[in-house]
Image (tube, rainbow, N blue to C red):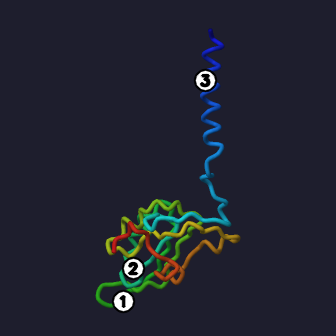
Amino acid sequence: MKFERYGLGIAKGMALTFKHLFRAPITVQYPEEKLVVSRRIRGNELVWYLDRCTGCATCAKACPQGNIEIVTHPGSENNYVVDKFEVDCGRCMFCGLCVEACPYDALAMGRSYERAQYRRQDVILNKEQLKLSDIRQPSGYARP
């Protein structure tokens, strides 16, 4: 009697296996083939809007890892001029707290997810590399 119960379970499992055996594969070979990614993806990059940034360094204070380094000097109209803005993306956990903390929406999470580099110095991004460009676009979740 026990054999009948086990035999039925094995038959159901084999039927499911054969059903999936002849389906088209779901996975792709990643470097050669890439899936279409939604524009609303929150990737692992930051986009910096130079015209919105006042140099208040709220983002650097909100970063739990301390990865954002800002050097400023006083400018006109109670604003600061940003001399140095660097983000160490190698240590960043992309939590988005810096984006939420910025009162002027000068930071946004980007769409890119391919950030592998061979040298550690290449993942430290300066203000020229963080600026909004054709390559570096904000996620669909970013505030306009």
Mark closest to the chain's N terminus, 1 or 3: 3
Q: 81 or 4, which lies in front?
A: 4
Place of residue 83 in the rendered image (x, y in percent of width and height, measured from the top left): 47, 85
Place of residue 45 in the rendered image (x, y in percent of width and height, measured from the top left): 51, 69
The residue wearing badge 3 is: 9
The residue wearing badge 2 is: 55
Mark closest to the chain's N terminus, 1 or 2: 2
Above or below, 32 against 122 in this view is above
What label does residue 75 carry, if any? 1
Do the CB atoms of the residues marked 3 and 2 lie less than 8 Å apart? no
Mark closest to the chain's N terminus, 3 or 2: 3
- Report the Cα–Cα distance between label 1 and label 2: 10 Å
Do the CB atoms of the residues marked 1 and 2 lie less than 8 Å apart? yes
- Amino acid type shown at disc 3: Gly
Instruction: Farthest residue to the top: give it.
Output: 1
- Amino acid type shown at disc 2: Gly
- SS for callout 3: helix
Mark 3 or mark 2: which is in front?
A: 3
Q: Residues within 10 Å of mark 3 (few under 14, many from 20)?
A: few
Q: What residue do we see at 65% from left, 43% from top? A: 21
Instruction: Farthest residue to the bottom: give it.
Output: 76
Above or below, 65 against 20 in this view is below
- Report the Cα–Cα distance between label 1 and label 3: 75 Å
Place of residue 27 in the rendered image (x, y in percent of width and height, measured from the top left): 62, 54
Q: 15 or 41, which lies in front?
A: 15
